[in-house]
Image: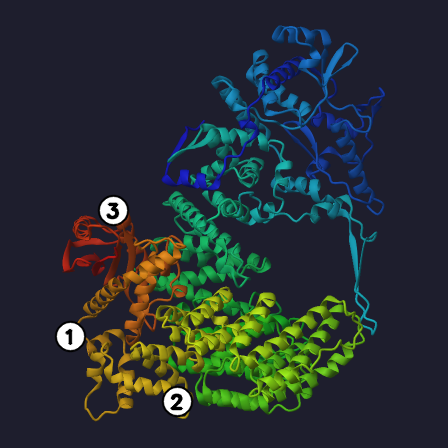
């Protein structure tokens, strides 16, 4: 016997409260009436003194029934003998019979049809059915029951209850001659009856015999093992019950069934019908002119019948022989609650554990019974199955927390506590799901890591649990980053210290060869990629000399893993190499930094031999094409990393060579990786390649275009054009596209023609759009006679395109005369297509409605200059019904035009607000060029500086380098005297477009810029450094400016800083921004009050709002130095799982070099826990020893001066986690009634300077 367990932690109570939102009313918690107590006591007396009227359904009796040596009594007085060829051993091993607690249970689902089944299977079914009937008393069999002499029972009950009648005490009793029997009733036998039965039997028998009799009675009378109510037992009665339960489990289950046998029992109970019914499915598809509906027929086949000897090979056993193995858990989880149905002892064990484990505030207590069960489970697969599979799936939260508290079971507990069922139950119970999930995640993982601390010497356990969580993340979905499992995984990994990371790396390398086969088989390779690459990135921050060797080993291992997967795709094996968002997001830079790009480039040494595998004769052609696309995506990711110039050129050439050689073509039987049958992932890759082309040099681009321009379909050329941001190249692509005269020869399918038509219309290439319509006609004519509804719907759609084309053509001809266009457009009508489609068909109705909307939409566009008010009216009516974002944009433009016409800026503000609301679900990278340009221009006109800066930062680099988007933002920067930020953006644009002198659209911006440059006071340091002579022109100065700002930050400071160090330079900038924030705090208070839904308040309630202002001001101030706060999307997550960018910042150079740390928080008083909490977590964000560290405190307090004194004293007295006290005294650098700046030095590998800036926001 083990002693009791006490485990102390503040997280136990928190986790328990989160998991158990509302206390459910269980049977054990309900209030029982006196009548129920009376009936339970009477039934207990009856069972304690009655005798079993039939044979016991134990293993001995069943063996005799199957052998034919015993018959079972029937109601007609005869005995029925079972005739079967099945032995007891066979039925038990095959999972059809079980004897838990020495009582027979039958596990067999009867098939729908038995005529075609083999005789051996029919024999099993008949035998199982007869045993079921005996067990339940069906088909004239006498059900197992107790009976007692009526006089004896009356005397016993009179002694207990007096003159109460037998019928009152036992209303279900029946008399047969002089005997009394109570029919078994599952629903009537409750834990109250079970409790009274145990107490009554203890009065008559010793504990051992009382328990044996109790077990027999509840199985006969209740047909299930119903637990007792411990709240009604005396201490001694409870102790004896637990002792007998332990004795039962140690003796009964120790020689019981294997995990495979248990799995058979579950399968036979629920899925045996599907197992033995062999089905044939016939699917007929006709492609003749009539095009009838597809027909599927299903039926049971009589061929290849399954025999009893074949059964064992049909079960899909879980991977692993141990029920607490994570590989087996997912398979067991599919059966859900059905697992419990196959285990009669489950309810009993559950209630015993619930009573023996409880949480008392910070203490989790477990009795000796619960500890003894875990010891017995080590050598008992049935008990392990109950403890580690069945009970956790019943949401026994206290029990799962008990498992979490023990080093030998915490892995199993964590698996269940992060399962989809648990997370769904948790998140659906609370309204603030995101905050609840974060709290739960942090507390759970903190306890798990605390439990295994000191137990995990080689990282195998961490790797095992990391793989399991990664498998749940859904890496095959592009939105996997939004899954709660992914947040749990990142939180777990971020919490690991350097020692744990090294152990994890070592285990990852050693176990990769072992993990690979089953992960390839189960399509779970992506977990290997994610964990491996995360380790490669994380190990860069590990301190110590021994990290380089293991870092080399890890990167070599990952390269080999990828190279092997690539080669196996060519050799006939299917590996997970499908390009997509997951692989693009991996930190390839961590591998490149160690190994360079040469190992990747060497994978394509035999690129000329790939053509032998890219043929339709090769059955593996799909895997080969996918692997090549994946390799191409990888190279495009690598080129963004810091690599040698020579390697960079090699990557450029390799990518373009792949596209030139295998991208497109018309050779019969040849597979091309970007042909018209490509998948969505391949199309996304072509978009990425189109963006990639912006980075390659002109000579390579010219070579690529010359080789491929004739082979690339016009639809793909349009994608290249849409993502090209270099003016000269845009013109080249325009010329190539417009030169396409005969589209019939391109052999495009309807999908590509559809894309080409839409793109041609978007670019005003109406002649080409007409050519696309003509190229589609032969294909559509072949489809018109068919009756497939999907094909007919597609024909309707093309008829709609033709109608829309006529409107566009007319609009372009008459765009300068909108009234004439509106008159002429009324003559264009949409007619029913010449196909067999009713006018009441939903597709035809929708298309007619859509065409009507389109004509109104074009009318509104035609009027938005001459009559914007009418244009607004038309588009408002359309938007109310269509909910189309394109309509919302047209309404936005019309409202802007009308607001400018009447001179009412409030109308512009209203238009902007409503349009931003309509596109709030649209990702920034998906916002079109015109949309982004109009938004920024509206913000410029409204002087919404802060909103414009935030919107600009959300755009992708490609979008920022688009002239139409860049122009309004740079104009806004110049108008608010931030000319050097505008100059930097123009310099970036100039790098892509060497000659912008002929671009007249940029002249107004350049003129304003030139006028503003000499008067800009913010950058006088740069100006002094550039001006070597007064003879320099503005453009010469701009060129020198570009050279200065391209320097590293420390060199930049040396040039313009007047001898300042980078630390002092940053300190001056931060304190200057602090002063500017103080001047703007009235605006912050107004915005805070607006967010509070009309509540007027002078407090700063929204910390994020202040942080947005602070970071925006810093980014704008330091944009010419190319430093700023790191983008939230690139900063990862903190150890808590919180996005670092949400509350903390890292000041970075444009090349991603980290320069300094920024931590901000609010104070409403001297909240010591808040202060120490923020200061202690600095070390967890910074593994590089960055200096300086800026602590910004937004204070909202009456006595600011006293707060600064108390803050200075408190900070001087405390230690920071991860830092050694060097000079704890905080020195005051600057103080006013609104601002206080303190400085101190701490030690962490080197001296780290801390600046504490307190701002009075009251």
The x and y percentages for residue 1073 are 25, 66
| Residue 178 drawn above or below residue 802 | above
Query: Is 312 placed left or right of 1181 in the picture?
Result: right
Q: Nearer the viewer, residue 786 or 845?
A: 845
For mark 3, what is the residue? 1168
Q: Nearer the viewer, residue 828 or 576?
A: 828
Q: CA distance from mark 3 to mark 1?
A: 38 Å
Q: Are marks 3 and 2 in contact (CB under 8 Å)?
A: no
What mark, if any, has residue 994 been given in the picture?
Answer: 2
Query: Is 505 placed left or right of 264 in the picture?
Result: left
The x and y percentages for residue 1145 are 32, 62
**Residue at (73, 47) in percent of width and height:** 275
The x and y percentages for residue 253 are 59, 31
User: Does label 3 or label 2 sit earlier along the sequence?
Assistant: 2
What mark, if any, has residue 928 been given in the picture?
Answer: none
Name the secondary structure under disc 2: loop
For mark 1, what is the residue? 1059
Query: Is 812 placed left or right of 155 in the picture?
Result: left
| Residue 1042 drawn above or below residue 1179 | below
Quadrant assignment, res 594: bottom left
**Residue at (56, 35) in percent of width and height:** 383
Q: Nearer the viewer, residue 1102 or 623?
A: 1102
Where does the N terminus fall, quadrant-wise? top left
| Residue 756 drawn above or below residue 155 | below
Q: Are marks 3 and 1 in contact (CB under 8 Å)?
A: no
Q: CA distance from mark 3 to mark 2?
A: 57 Å
Name the secondary structure under disc 1: loop
Q: Is residue 229 visible?
A: yes
Q: Are marks 2 and 1 in contact (CB under 8 Å)?
A: no
Q: Nearer the viewer, residue 899 or 577?
A: 899
């Amino acid at each position: 016997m083990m002693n009791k367990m006490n485990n102390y932690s503040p997280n136990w109570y928190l986790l328990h409260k989160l998991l158990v939102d509302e206390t459910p009313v269980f049977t054990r918690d309900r209030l029982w009436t006196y009548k129920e107590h009376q009936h339970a006591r009477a039934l207990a007396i009856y069972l304690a003194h009655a005798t079993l009227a039939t044979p016991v359904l134990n293993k001995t009796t069943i063996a005799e029934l199957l052998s034919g040596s015993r018959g079972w009594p029937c109601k007609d007085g005869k005995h029925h003998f079972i005739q079967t060829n099945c032995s007891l051993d066979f039925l038990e091993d095959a999972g059809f019979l079980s004897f838990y607690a020495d009582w027979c249970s039958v596990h067999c689902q009867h098939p729908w049809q038995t005529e075609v089944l083999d005789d051996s299977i029919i024999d099993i079914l008949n035998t199982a059915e007869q045993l079921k009937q005996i067990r339940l008393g069906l088909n004239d069999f006498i059900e197992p029951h107790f009976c007692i002499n009526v006089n004896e029972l009356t005397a016993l009950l009179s002694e207990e209850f007096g003159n109460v009648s037998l019928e009152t005490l036992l209303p279900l009793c029946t008399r047969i001659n002089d005997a009394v029997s109570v029919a078994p009733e599952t629903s009537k036998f409750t834990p109250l009856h079970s409790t009274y039965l145990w107490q009554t039997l203890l009065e008559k028998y010793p504990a051992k015999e009382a328990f044996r009799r109790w077990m027999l009675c509840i199985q006969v009378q209740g047909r299930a093992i119903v637990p007792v109510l411990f709240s009604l037992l005396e201490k001694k009665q409870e102790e004896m019950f637990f002792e007998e339960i332990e004795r039962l489990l140690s003796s009964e289950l120790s020689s019981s069934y294997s995990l495979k046998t248990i799995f058979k029992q579950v399968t036979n109970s629920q899925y045996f019908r599907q197992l033995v019914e062999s089905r044939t499915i016939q699917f007929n598809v006709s492609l003749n002119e009539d095009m009838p509906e597809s027909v599927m027929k299903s039926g049971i086949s009589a061929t290849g019948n399954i025999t009893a000897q074949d059964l064992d090979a049909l079960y899909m056993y879980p991977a692993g022989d141990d029920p607490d193995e994570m590989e087996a858990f997912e398979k067991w989880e599919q059966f859900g609650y059905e697992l419990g149905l196959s285990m009669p002892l489950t309810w009993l064990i559950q209630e015993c554990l619930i009573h023996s484990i409880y949480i008392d505030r910070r203490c989790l207590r477990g009795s000796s019974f619960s500890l003894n069960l875990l010891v017995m489970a080590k050598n008992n697969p049935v008990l392990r199955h109950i403890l580690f599979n069945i009970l956790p799936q019943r949401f026994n939260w206290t029990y799962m927390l008990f498992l979490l508290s023990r080093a030998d079971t915490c892995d199993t507990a964590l698996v269940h506590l992060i399962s989809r069922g648990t997370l769904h139950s948790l998140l659906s119970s609370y309204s603030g799901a995101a905050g609840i999930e974060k709290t739960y995640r942090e507390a759970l993982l903190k306890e798990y890591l605390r439990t295994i601390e000191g137990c995990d010497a080689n990282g195998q356990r961490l790797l095992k649990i990391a793989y399991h969580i990664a498998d749940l993340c859904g890496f095959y979905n592009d939105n996997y980053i939004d899954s709660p499992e992914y947040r749990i995984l990142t939180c777990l990994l971020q919490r690991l210290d350097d020692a744990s990371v090294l152990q994890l790396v070592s285990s990852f390398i050693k176990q990769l060869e072992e993990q690979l086969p089953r992960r390839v088989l189960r399509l779970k390779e992506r977990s290997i990629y994610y964990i491996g690459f995360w380790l490669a990135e994380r190990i860069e921050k590990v301190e110590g000399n021994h990290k380089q060797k293991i870092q080399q080993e890890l990167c070599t291992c990952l390269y080999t893993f990828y190279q092997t997967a690539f080669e196996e795709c060519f050799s006939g094996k299917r590996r997970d190499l499908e390009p997509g968002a997951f692989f693009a997001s991996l930190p390839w830079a961590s591998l490149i930094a160690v190994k360079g790009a040469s190992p990747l480039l060497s994978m394509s040494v035999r690129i000329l031999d790939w053509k032998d595998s890219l043929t339709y004769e090769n059955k593996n052609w799909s895997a080969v094409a996918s692997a090549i696309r994946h390799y191409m995506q990888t190279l495009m990711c690598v080129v963004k990393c810091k690599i040698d110039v020579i390697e960079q050129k090699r990557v450029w050439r390799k990518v373009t060579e792949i596209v030139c050689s295998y991208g497109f073509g018309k050779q019969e039987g040849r597979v091309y990786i970007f042909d018209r049958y490509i998948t969505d992932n391949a199309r996304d890759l072509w978009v990425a390649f189109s963006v990639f082309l912006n980075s390659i040099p002109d000579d390579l681009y010219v070579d690529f275009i010359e080789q491929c321009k004739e082979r690339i379909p016009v639809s793909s050329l349009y994608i290249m054009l849409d993502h090209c941001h270099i003016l000269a190249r845009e013109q080249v692509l325009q010329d190539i596209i417009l030169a396409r005269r005969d589209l019939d020869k391109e052999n495009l399918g309807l999908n590509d023609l559809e894309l080409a038509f839409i793109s041609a219309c978007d670019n005003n290439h109406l002649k080409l759009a007409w050519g696309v319509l003509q190229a589609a006609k032969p294909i559509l004519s072949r489809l018109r006679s068919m009756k497939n509804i999907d094909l007919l719907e597609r024909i309707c759609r093309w008829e709609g395109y033709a109608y829309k084309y006529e409107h566009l053509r007319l609009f372009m001809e008459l765009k300068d005369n909108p009234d004439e266009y509106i008159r002429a457009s009324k003559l264009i009508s949409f007619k029913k297509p010449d196909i067999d489609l009713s006018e009441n068909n939903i597709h035809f109705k929708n298309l007619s409605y859509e065409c009507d909307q389109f004509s109104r939409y074009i009318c509104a566009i035609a009027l938005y200059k001459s009559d914007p008010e009418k244009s607004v009216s038309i588009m408002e009516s359309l938007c109310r019904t269509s909910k189309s974002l394109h309509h919302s944009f047209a309404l936005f433009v019309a409202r802007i035009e009308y607001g400018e016409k009447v001179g009412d800026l409030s109308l512009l503000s209203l238009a902007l607000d409503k349009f931003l609301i309509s596109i709030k679900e649209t990702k920034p990278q998906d916002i079109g060029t015109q949309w982004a340009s109009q938004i920024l221009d509206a913000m410029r006109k409204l002087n919404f500086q802060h909103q414009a800066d935030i919107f600009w930062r959300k755009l992708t680099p490609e979008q920022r380098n688009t002239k139409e988007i860049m122009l309004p933002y740079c104009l806004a920067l110049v108008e608010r005297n931030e000319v050097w930020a505008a100059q930097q953006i123009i310099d970036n644009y100039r790098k892509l477009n060497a000659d912008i002198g002929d671009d007249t659209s940029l002249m107004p911006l350049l003129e304003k810029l030139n006028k503003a440059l000499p008067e800009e006071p913010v950058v006088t340091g740069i100006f002094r450094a550039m001006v070597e002579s007064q003879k320099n022109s503005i453009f010469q100065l701009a060129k020198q400016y570009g050279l200065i700002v391209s320097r590293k930050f420390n060199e930049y400071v040396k040039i313009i800083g007047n001898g300042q160090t980078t630390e002092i330079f940053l300190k001056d900038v931060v304190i200057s921004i602090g002063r500017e924030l103080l001047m703007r705090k009235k605006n912050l208070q107004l915005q805070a009050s607006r967010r509070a839904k009309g509540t007027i308040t002078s407090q700063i309630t929204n910390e994020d709002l202040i942080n947005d202002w602070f970071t925006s001001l810093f980014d704008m101030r330091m944009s010419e130095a190319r430093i700023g706060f790191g983008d939230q999307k690139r900063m990862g997550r903190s150890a808590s799982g919180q996005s670092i960018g949400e509350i903390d910042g890292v000041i970075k150079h444009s090349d991603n070099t980290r320069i300094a740390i920024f931590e901000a928080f609010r104070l409403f008083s001297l909240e010591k826990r808040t202060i120490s909490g923020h200061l202690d977590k600095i070390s967890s964000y910074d593994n590089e020893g960055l200096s300086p560290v800026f602590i910004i405190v937004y204070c909202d307090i009456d006595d600011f001066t006293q707060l600064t004194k108390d803050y200075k004293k408190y900070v001087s007295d405390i230690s920071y986690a991860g830092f050694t006290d060097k000079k704890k005294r905080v020195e005051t650098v600057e103080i006013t009634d609104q601002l206080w700046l303190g400085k101190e030095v701490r030690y962490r590998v080197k001296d780290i300077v801390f600046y504490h800036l307190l701002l009075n926001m009251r």
